[in-house]
Image (cartoon, coloured by chain):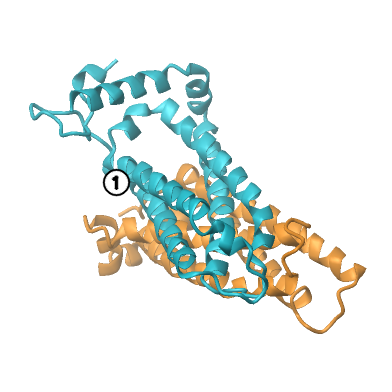
Amino acid sequence: MTAWIEASGFSIWMRESPSFLAFPLMLSLHAIGMGLAAGINGALALRLLGVAPDVPVSEMKRFFPAMWAGVWVNGLSGVALLIAYPTKALTNPVFYGKLALVALALAISRSTGRRVFGQSAAWDAERTRTARRLAVASLAVWISAITAGRLLAYTYTHILAAR
Amino acid sequence: MKSVHGIQTWLVWTLASVTPVGSFMRTHWGWPAAESVHFVGLSLLVGTIVVWDLRLLGVGRRIPIAALRALVRWTLVGYAITFVSGLMFLMTEPTEYIYNPAFHYKVLFMALAGLNALAFYLTVSRRTLALGAGQEAPLPARIIAAASLFLWMAVIVSGRLLTFYRPGWCGAEPPGFLADCVPLLQRW
């Protein structure tokens, strides 16, 4: 399966093209998307933990689209990077750990969007506690996801499928 | 021209002289750990900057801009984390950076981003910070915000391109104004 992907035109182009548009661009986009997704989530979390108290919390939801744009950029560039080296990623347990952490981080973001930024409930002590718990979880999970992502370059065992 | 090469040589030797950092970075998990810290710092730095810039560009308009000042401290924390971990890479493999054209661009974009922020504080910051909720930032502030977004993206891209522009050893050709190959005398 991974050998078949590696033999595809796009996979070969991603690995071997000297063009900036191939591997370098996808890697760059993946870092920019990380800055947007993890970074804006970090800023949201800081606000929910009490930083910049004069910023109306409800207004922070306006930054959600930019954050989700970062998530999409990373989903697409991530798929391109995966197609370039499927064996390298899929034979590495850390890769599945990273995916699980990102999925968890996104679930926390969605939950924050609904339970903290949803208009239904009043802003009471209960909601403040929920917001703080979600913010701490978001920071911890994003830091772990970034670390797992970086470690992919140091923990793989196979680069390409054996011929 | 000669003096620029002199500065490059001096930087390499000065950075390499901080041997305890190099020793730590050459342990099994030293370099990967520093990279992880660098990327976490990057996210904090860029995330807080993006929130500032988007507000100046009109996103989240009901936020009084002065209220975002409390975020600046966290931008500086992100900057410090990224800067120190970045310095650790340079202290371990100085020639890989000092002679790398992607690194030259990265430093250039960082400097421009710094000047851009300075321009904000020297020109429209007082007027902009006085704005209340719902008010639009003046045009110069919006231009500075757009430039900031562009420059920080450029810093990230040139950082990611470092590995594609690893400098080789200089041949017989004399290097240009800013050497992007390692002079033979650097070999130790």
The answer to whether residue B53 is left or right of residue B10 is: right
- The outermost residue toward the right is A125
Q: Residue at position x 81%, y 60% from top? A: A133
| Residue A157 in the image, given as x and y percentages of width and height | 45, 45
Of all residues shown, which one is farthest toward the bottom? Answer: A120
Residue at the spot of label 1: B164
Residue nearest the viewer, comparing B57 with A19: B57
The answer, for residue A23, to whether it is visible in the render is: yes
Res. A100 visible in picture: no
Above or below, B151 relative to B105: below
Q: A17 or B20, which is in the foreground?
A: B20
The residue at 62%/61% (across/down) is: B129
Q: Could you say where residue A162 lies in the image, as x and y percent from the top left?
A: 34, 52
Chain coloured cyan in this rendering: B
* Residue positioned 55% across, 53% down in the render: B43
Image location (x, y in percent) of residue A98: 57, 56
Instruction: Check the image and name the residue furthest to the left.
Output: B172
